[in-house]
């Protein structure tokens, strides 16, 4: 949801550093991009509609384009379409102040009217453009650049991570409120960005800014101040993953790489938390976590993980509900005694933050289940349980969904009244190997090829496989742009069956041979009777394979972990369908990875 970057101390490399960093932030938005360079002289600014490549091409051969400090931006449009004019950085009337921004300035219209009334001319439709003009007005009134920046930020309502250059000053001014912003600290150079991958290859030492904080990066170093201007000394943290983790490692797409990284990601999630010998589960972060009841709040794929987690908890006797975070925030259900668990890969999703904040406002205890160290949710919730999946760059969540499911299994084992279920614990230990077996032997690509001309794709499952059906359909929609829906298998006959034809393959996940499985096999027969092709994702224990046109096999395991393994087959089907249709898999149209607006 827009990515910003800035750097000081890179000399001749400033422009290259910015453009490279933007390419690492493209997952946050990719409809336009721009850079501004400055220093002791004037500012140079270039911006283009389109992906970073368009900016890179426009910069080709522009040797005059240099400076010792710089900022950059990659955009996911909110105010105005993706055009050169609406791309960031935005400038004041004289081109002496350049600003990049991630977030939404809610009072921009009033500020714009006021500034226009005072003679400022605007060139874009964006909310951001008021910021350089506010700074310009303060400078004209005699303020220093720092004071002008601080005063302008003080006029803003809404969410922002903002970086700013002022001509003639070798500094980047930075402010944060409700949008992520992290500094990278290296020998002789300092960076800022919406996320660490932007500068990870230069440093692993980072400072996460808090809401209300400001920073100034200059050749003399960096200084962080609070809203009142007092200097603060934030902790410097060390990032645990390498720069290579943010590359494609030879895969055609980040999504495929991340699907294949799942065994490793889950090993990391389980490491030190599952006792190999004793069959017990200990999660240090969950030391004091002993909820009476649980409300899980999340959006998108994370909501599917929340639905799955709620089922696990309920099955172990802990009342639990999963809620869409956006609905929870606007019409919160009674939550007396409930601990609210925010499930979010990024830890920055505005909808989910709104829900956990609403929970805190009402006095509920909160827990963040997230992948992102130092994220807003991790810092705001009472406790944080990291899923440790490593950086996920593909817009479509894959390994982090598996990580969330695995973490919620661990959480259930920890809080469940019963002593840890040895069968589940041993299935968790086998999980990375089971997923590897699917990755090594899947026929998902052939299945994808068979149904490339389908009118629509339907996904069904019961119990723990219902969230898998929803997730299978979401992945298909996001990256293939084909119509796909996920249903609780029992719901099909209550309406959606009317959509089923010989050209709508139905993907049914069936695990084990219990009553749930047998009922789902019944649903398979119903769609088969309507001539719909059936693809069964199954461990072969039930009759599902007998009635299916294709079978995508998974190893036999506990039904809790089977839902995680089955989902991998569906990820592969969506991936290969999208790849064969030539879709831009890692950057689907209209989407961005981290949705920081409500
Ligand atoms: C789907 C996807 C989104 C996210 C959702 C929540 O592939 O990635 O649906 O799951 O936007 O994001 P997080 O988990 O960062 O809160």
Image (cartoon, grey):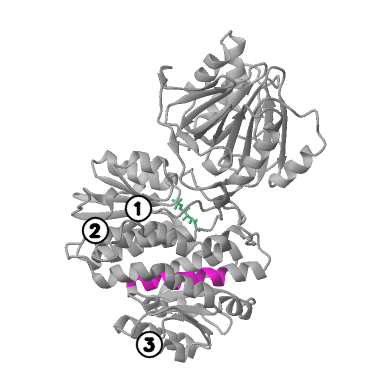
Q: Choose the circle earlier in sequence order: 1 or 3.
A: 1
Cβ–Cβ under 8 Å for marks 2 and 3: no
Residue under pointer 3: 542
Residue 169, compared with residue 293, is above or below; it is above
> Residue 215: x, y in percent?
50, 24
Q: Quadrant of the N terminus?
A: top right
Q: Which label sits on residue 399?
A: none
Q: Residue at x 50, y 68 (%)?
A: 473
Q: Residue at x 55, y 72 (%)?
A: 573
Q: Choose the circle earlier in sequence order: 1 or 2.
A: 1
Secondary structure at badge 2 equals: helix
Mark 2 against mark 3, which lies toward the viewer? 2
> Residue 72: x, y in percent?
64, 35
Q: Residue at x 57, y 39 (%)?
A: 199
Residue 270, compared with residue 60, is above or below; it is below
**Is residue 192 found left or right of 511 in the rendered image?**
right
The magenta segment is: 560-574
Residue under pointer 1: 297
Residue 303 shows in this picture: no
* Quarter where residue 89 is shown: top right
Secondary structure at badge 1 equals: strand
Crowding near the residue tagged with mark 1, few <14, some 14–19, many ≥20 C-alpha atoms within 10 Å = many
**Mark 1 to mark 3 CA distance (whole Å):** 34 Å
- Which of 277 and 595 lies nearest the eye of the viewer? 277
Residue under pointer 2: 414
């Amino acid at each position: 949801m827009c990515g910003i970057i800035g750097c000081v101390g890179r000399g001749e490399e400033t422009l290259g550093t910015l453009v490279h960093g933007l390419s690492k932030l493209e997952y946050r938005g990719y409809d336009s991009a721009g850079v501004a360079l400055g220093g002791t002289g004037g500012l140079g600014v270039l911006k283009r509609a389109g992906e970073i490549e368009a900016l890179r091409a426009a910069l080709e051969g522009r040797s005059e384009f240099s400076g010792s400090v710089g900022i950059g931006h990659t955009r996911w449009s909110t105010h105005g379409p993706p055009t050169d004019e609406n791309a960031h950085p935005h400038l004041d009337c004289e081109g002496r102040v350049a600003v990049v921004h991630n977030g939404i300035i809610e009072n921009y219209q009033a500020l714009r009217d006021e500034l226009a009334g005072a003679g400022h001319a605007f060139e874009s439709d964006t909310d951001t453009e008021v910021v350089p003009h506010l700074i310009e007005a303060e400078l004209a009134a005699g303020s220093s650049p720092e004071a002008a920046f601080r005063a302008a930020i003080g006029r803003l309502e809404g969410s922002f991570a903002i970086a700013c250059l002022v001509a003639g000053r070798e500094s980047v001014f930075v402010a944060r409120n409700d949008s992520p912003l992290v500094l990278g600290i290296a020998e002789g150079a300092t960076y800022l960005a919406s996320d660490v991958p932007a500068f990870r290859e230069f440093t692993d030492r980072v400072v996460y800014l808090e809401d209300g904080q400001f920073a100034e990066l200059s050749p003399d170093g960096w200084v962080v101040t609070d809203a009142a201007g007092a200097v603060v000394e934030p902790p410097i943290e060390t990032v645990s993953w390498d720069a290579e983790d943010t590359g494609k490692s030879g895969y055609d797409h980040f999504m495929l790489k991340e699907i294949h990284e799942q065994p490793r990601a889950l090993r990391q999630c389980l490491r030190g938390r599952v006792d190999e010998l004793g069959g017990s589960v200990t999660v240090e972060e969950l030391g004091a976590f002993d909820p009476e009841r649980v409300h899980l709040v999340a959006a998108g794929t994370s909501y599917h993980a929340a639905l799955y987690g709620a089922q696990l908890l309920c099955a172990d006797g802990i009342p639990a509900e999963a809620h869409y975070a956006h609905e929870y925030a606007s019409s919160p259900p009674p939550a007396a005694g409930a601990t609210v668990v925010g499930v979010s890969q990024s830890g920055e999703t505005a909808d989910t933050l709104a829900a956990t904040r609403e929970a805190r406002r009402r006095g509920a205890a909160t827990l963040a289940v997230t992948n992102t160290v130092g994220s807003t949710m991790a810092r705001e919730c009472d406790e944080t349980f990291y899923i440790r999946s490593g950086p996920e760059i593909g817009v479509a969540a894959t390994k982090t969904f598996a990580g969330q499911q695995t973490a919620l299994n661990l959480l259930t084992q920890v809080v469940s009244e019963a002593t840890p279920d040895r069968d589940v614990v041993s299935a968790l230990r086998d999980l990375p190997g089971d997923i590897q077996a699917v990755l090594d032997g899947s026929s998902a690509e052939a299945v994808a090829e068979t149904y490339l001309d389908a009118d629509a794709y339907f996904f069904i499952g019961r119990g723990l496989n219902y969230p898998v059906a929803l997730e299978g359909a979401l992945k298909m929609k996001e990256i293939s742009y084909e119509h796909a829906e996920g249903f609780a298998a029992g719901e099909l006959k209550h309406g959606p069956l009317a959509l089923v034809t010989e050209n709508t393959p139905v993907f049914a996940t069936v695990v084990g041979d219990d009553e749930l499985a047998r009922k789902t096999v019944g649903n398979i027969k119903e769609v088969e009777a309507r001539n719909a092709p059936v693809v069964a994702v199954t461990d072969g224990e039930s009759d599902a394979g007998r009635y299916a046109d294709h079978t995508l096999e998974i190893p036999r395991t506990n039904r809790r972990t089977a839902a995680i393994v089955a989902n991998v087959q569906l990820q592969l089907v969506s991936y290969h369908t999208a790849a064969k249709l030539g879709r831009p898999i890692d950057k689907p149209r209209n989407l961005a990875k981290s949705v920081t607006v409500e």
